[in-house]
Image: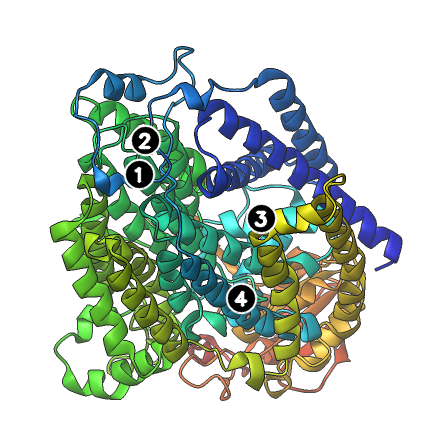
Amino acid sequence: MSVAAYFFGLAQMLLVIGALGYAAIRLRRRLLPGWDEAAGYLVAAVTGIGLLVVTAQLLGVFGLLYGWALVLSSLLIGLAAHFRLGPGPDPESSPRSPESRSPESGSLRSGSPESRSLRSGSPEGDAEVSRPPRPPVTAHGFWFALLATAVVVAQWAAFTSYSLDAGISNFDSVWYHLPFSADMFQTGSTLGFHKTETVFLNWFYPQNSELVHTVAMALTGRDFFSVLLNMGWLALALLAAWCIGRPYARPHLTLIAASILLATHTLVVREPGMAKNDIVAIALILSAIGILINRGADPSDTRGRIGPGWAMAAAGLAVGLAAGTKVTALAPAAMITFAVLFSAHHGTRLRSAGVWFGAAFVGGGFWYLRNLLATGNPIPQVRSIGPINLPGPERLQEGRADFNVFHYIGDTSIWREYFFPGLEQGFGTLWPVLLAVAVIGLVALIWRGPGRLTRAHGLAALLAIAAYLITPLSAAGPEGSPDAFAINLRFLVPALAMGLVLIPLVPWFRKPRPQLGLGLLLLFLFFATGRGDAIWSESGGYFGIAFALALVVVPSLAWRFRERLSALNPEKPLLAWVAGAAVLAGLLLSWPLASGYFDSRYNDFEADAGLAEPYRWASGVEDAEIGLAGTTAGFRQFGFFGEDLSNHLTYIGREAPAGGFDVIRSCPEFRRAVNEAELDYLVTSPFLNFIGEREPVFSPERSWVAGDPSLSLEVGPGPVEVWRVDGPLDPSACDPSGPGPESTPGLVEG
């Protein structure tokens, strides 16, 4: 990639971010004029993400999801916001308590004129005149928060450096996250289903996070910024966590509580620098809670009650965006929905439900509607609800059973051999303390929480944690061997994060000494359960430290001491100039990172599985039609898209009813499918063994094509081979004594 092409793509991306960000800020100022500082930034961030996702979805419906269309649409949205959205009503004219007043110190009587005015909105009728409290935060609170933020950012950046050095290598990322993004990038459409293999049904997953990767690809033509996107989602999660405690003068405690989970092994070794989306769901769920807590904390209203206003809509949008990212986010989303409707003002529940579900549908309904229209089922993986059968595709192959934790709830041997070691691996040796703090704290919050909404959120978090026990794949693996339990603890993290960030809101921690004690306990758990050692034990530690210093420590200190810095030269906006110079330097320094990334991307990917040489070959191939056969290639397919993502991939399988995709079980049918795909190259590989990935299982596709004169070996011999296709294969030339249907692995019938 040339320097000019890189900076042109970067300029396009900055235009889109700037235009949509400007529109989001104008919307927030118009509709929630009293929301400033952190809570206002959070609402603007969620709104901006929503604008980006919805714009990309709509462009994709018409097959226009390309860079030029994204830039043009974003500029039009920004211009419309500039000319059509004036400032909202003066927030200072709305009833409010002094900034030092906490919502726990009292509220206006329910039904008072002030309360009714607040719920009905501004005199202009289109703005919500509420203002979250901003009591002062203690000095030690700032330093506690800075310490936790700097450490967790350094950890994530340290692991991100691996992807910058070698390319995105995470299993799920190269299996379906990035292939979905690359397919939308190539086709410009959000309506298609990119079928990655014949074992799972992941093309029916909601794809908000993949869509964001697609936007970055469409604007830059490459996948470099996919490495960095999860750092942005981390920043949103930390901002949301800070906002949850801000109205109660405890933002440092809620931020540290969230950091405990963000720094655990479960997330920190799989999310940074990858395209996995657990952090996306966590950030959006926390954002919804942060917005709702700030709205419910306004002392000018009935404490802990909320009405159907713009704050509720912003929180509903965040929940919808989370549900449109992962199916596993549906449980936390449902629990938050319960809390919202339970806490709505008397007489407004129907309107509240309309606002909430309407905003949530905008954020996440697209993918479920697409599935419904294609299969008759919004979640086709779910084939039944109790006695009710639902439409959906049959699965001819399977990789591993999708047991849940509840399946083994009374099996002490499974707990001893799998669950306890998995919990220790995921959350550290003090995992019992962590879970105990979460559960006991939530019970206390339900009992003594400040206001109906906060108590309802506590119950919602507790129910979401319980729902993890019945989450499919939470104990995936063969009967009696839930090998994927430790990996899939990430399904628990959003619910656990919901719980931990709410604990500091218990009124017991209003006083300085209990508050300090809780802060020290949370910091202890943060360092005892997380991967703080990554800063000095991992090879990317120095990069992580430099990243955290540049983007967290120095800006935070400059903001903390801004008055002293301004006094050095009161005639000039020193901070603004320094900030602008730092941003410009960062943009210029991003090119060496990008250049190094493309020089080393996928140079040595999974050599033990035989993929290193095929991936190196694919990096130099452009605009080729490549067919994949054997699930090892299907599950590890992203590298075959090439460096410029121009290669079109087709997994060779057979279309099945209701959107299904089945394995081909005979040589003649397979050869005919290869011919129909009009390939330039064919990749053959073994069947991926989920029980032992280093022990692949024979798959017959290579035997079905070897010896055909239309094929010549391009890469190989080896476990994964690339064949150049010079003409149509001859189905009649199949060896009748060759592998038949009985040799096809993973079959669940026949």
Identify residue for label 1.
101
Please state which of residues 598 and 678 is positioned toward the viewer in this rendering. Answer: 598
Q: Which residue is mark 3?
A: 212
Q: Label 4, on which residue?
A: 150
Q: Nearer the viewer, residue 383 or 221?
A: 221
- Give the mark nearer the N terminus: 1 vs 3: 1
Percent x, y of residue 502: 28, 54
* Amino acid type for the residue under numbered disc 4: Ala
* Residue 423 rendering spot, x and y as whole percentages: 30, 78
| Percent coordinates x, y for residue 526 in the rendering | 39, 72
Q: Position of residue 687 (x, y in %)?
A: 50, 78
Earlier residue among tags 3 and 2: 2
Task: Give the quadrant of the N terminus.
Answer: bottom right
- Judged by depth in the image, the label closer to the viewer, 1 or 4, is 1
**In the rendered image, which residue does mark 2 sit on?**
97
Instruction: Using the rendered view, name the quadrant where residue 690 is placed.
Output: bottom left
- Of labels 3 and 4, earlier in sequence is 4
Query: How far apart are the alpha carbons under marks 3 and 4?
Result: 26 Å
Could you tell me the amino acid type at mark 1? Answer: Arg
Three-letter amino acid code at the position of disc 3: Val
